[in-house]
Image: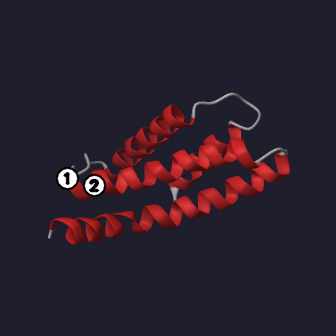
Amino acid sequence: MIGATIFGVWLLTTFRRQRSAFWESCVVIWVIIGVNALIAHAAPEINGIWLLSWGICWLFVFFSFWFMDVLCATFVGSVIFVVSAAVGYFYLSERAAGLAENFIKLWFG
C-alpha cells in the first residue's frame, strides 16, 4: 500500500514538468524497495523471483510515466490517471511474485 502511495504521489507531482520515464521509474522502484526494506526491518531475499517481480513492477511504472505524457492534458485527467495507475500498481505488486514464479516455472522448469 505504501508503494502505491509513493508511486501515485510521485506520478502526480510530475504533471506539467519535463521528465524522463526511464530514470524516474528506476528511482521510484528503488525508493519503494528501500521503504519496503525499512518497514520490514530486513534486507530483501534477492533471488530470481524477487528480481523478476520487481522488473514487472518497474515495467508498469515505466509505462505509467510514459502514458501520463501521452494521455494527460489536464489536471483532472491526470488525477484520474494517477488514481487508476496507483490502484493498478497496488494489485500488481501484490501479485507480482506469483506471476514471476509462474513465469520461471513455465520457462525454466
Element under disc 2: helix
Horizontal side of 74 relative to 18 (left or right) equals right
Residue for badge 2: 50
Residue that lies at the very extreme toward the front in this rendered image: 107
Element under disc 1: loop
Residue shown at the point (74%, 38%) measured from the top left: 15
Residue 104 point in image, percent of width and height: 23, 65
Residue 78 point in image, percent of width and height: 76, 49
Residue shown at the point (16%, 65%) measured from the top left: 108
Residue 27 point in image, percent of width and height: 47, 35
Q: Quadrant of residue 105?
A: bottom left
Residue for badge 1: 47
Depth order, front residue of 5/38: 5
Q: Residues within 10 Å of mark 1 (few under 14, many from 20)?
A: few
Horizontal side of 87 relative to 38 (left or right) equals right
Query: Pointer 2 and pointer 1: residues touching (CB < 8 Å)?
Result: yes
Residue shown at the point (83%, 45%) measured from the top left: 75
Residue shown at the point (37%, 50%) measured from the top left: 55
Tell me the quadrant of the picture where the C terminus can be found. bottom left
